[in-house]
Image (cartoon, rainbow, N blue to C red):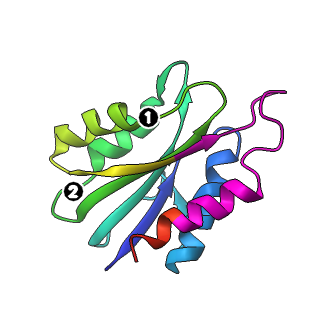
Amino acid sequence: MTYAVRYYTKTGNTKKLAEAVAAELGVEALPITEPVSEKVDILFLGNSYYAFTIDPEVRSFIASLDKEKVGKIVNFGSAAMLNSTYKKVKAEADKVGIPMDENEFHCKGEFKNVHKGRPNEADIEAIKEFTRKYK
């Protein structure tokens, strides 16, 4: 299996999760400004809610993906208030013909004084465990 990890973050929370995923898979976590140029079986895509939706940069990144290079997307992320971005990411992935894995990882993320210290060490261990299912 081949993997890539890309993430979008404004606060650094999703980057922490992406780095844990990448370390588990033995690859590098890169921001979505780095295109997926190699063929991968699974793209782990980290993102979050911003103003009740995924960021336009995440939409653009997904639109730029080549369905011949990406086998499927595994969604992960963190957010202070809302939970899963799965439906929003899937809607964009459907437009380019890339399937989404039905499983995803989500945890609370710190924003201002809400969920202080999240993602924490337990969240990092949880995403590592989640990632191992794909090895």
Q: Nearer the viewer, residue 122 or 90?
A: 122
Task: Determine whether 122 is above or below 79 in the image.
Answer: below
Instruction: Give the mark, 1 or 2, whose residue is nearer the N terminus.
Output: 2
Quadrant of residue 108 in the image? Answer: top right
Q: Nearer the viewer, residue 55 or 52?
A: 52
**Magenta span:** 106-129
Q: Residue at x 55, y 67 (%)?
A: 129
Task: Determine whether 111 is above or below 20 in the image.
Answer: above
Quadrant of residue 92 in the image? Answer: top left
122 on left or right of 75:
right
Disc 1 packing (10 Å; few <14; some 14–19; many ≥20): many
Query: Which residue position holds label 2?
Result: 66
Query: Which residue position holds label 1?
Result: 85
Residue type indicated by callout 1: Thr
Q: Is residue 107 magenta?
A: yes
Residue type indicated by callout 2: Asp
